Image: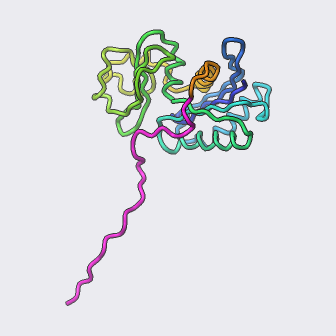
Amino acid sequence: MLLLAFDTATPAVTAAVCALDGDGVRVRAASSSVDARRHGELLTPAIRDVLADAGCGLGDLTHIAVGIGPGPYTGLRVGLATAHALADALGVPCHGVATLDAVAFASGRTGPFIAATDARRKEVFWARYADAATRTGDIAVDRPADIDTGGLPVIGHGARMYADVLGADPAAADPLHPSAAALGEVALRRLAAGADLPEPRPLYLRRPDATVPGAPKKVRQWSA
């Protein structure tokens, strides 16, 4: 299996080409940059570059994996729209991976911890993990002060932003953002094990800021 992975659910724009290599996964090429305002500009060049660095073309891919968030609406949709377009054009399966699972996997931790990313509005997206590869509950969105960490280590950008509230060590919060290399490895390991992967649909945990306007109020005319 040769898999293209990418994620745009956080300020990071990250892409990688990964392949099964015996019982493990080999990352053939990877690229990451952090720019919360340029997901649409940076993703396609990143995909082009990792394919070139990996010495393969789009036609060589057998799978695509994309981060499904949670994350801000605009950035998240860039990655998902690109993943669906490529998968449809190439006729290959497209799989989703929770962005926090990629953050957690890249940590390499062997004991329990919490991963948290910035959700804006002074909130974080977060989840508990038994180890780097095992999430133990659903992903949630909360204010940092409302999260009972139980004294567990907290990693991710959310941990660094709210270290004082979460009781986290900001110097030990890495990785702050997901990497496509980790996301790709998560996807390939699960595929090789016959495990199910989420549908490549956005994981929204709250309503978007923009809403459809309601019907205009009726105005009663005044007459003398």
On screen, 33 above or below 113? below
**What secondary structure predominates along the stretch shown in magenta?**
loop
Residue 183, by quadrant, is: top right
- Residue with the most extreme bottom position: 224
Seen at 61% across and 28% down, the residue is 32
Q: Of residues 30 and 132, which is closer to you in this image?
A: 132
On screen, 141 above or below 214? above
Q: Of residues 189 and 42, which is closer to you in this image?
A: 189
71 sits to left or right of 15? left
83 sits to left or right of 67? right
Q: Of residues 176 and 216, which is closer to you in this image?
A: 216
Q: Of residues 95 and 55, which is closer to you in this image?
A: 95
Q: Position of residue 161 (x, y in %)?
A: 39, 27
Q: Position of residue 98 (x, y in %)?
A: 51, 30
On screen, 199 above or below 116? below
In magenta, the rendered stretch is: 197-224
Residue 204, by quadrant, is: top left
- Residue 79 lies in the magenta stretch: no
- Residue with the most extreme top position: 110
Q: Position of residue 205 (x, y in %)?
A: 41, 39
Seen at 51% across and 29% down, the residue is 99
On screen, 222 above or below 36? below
**Image quadrant occupied by the C terminus:** bottom left
Asked if residue 182 shows in the view, the reply is: no
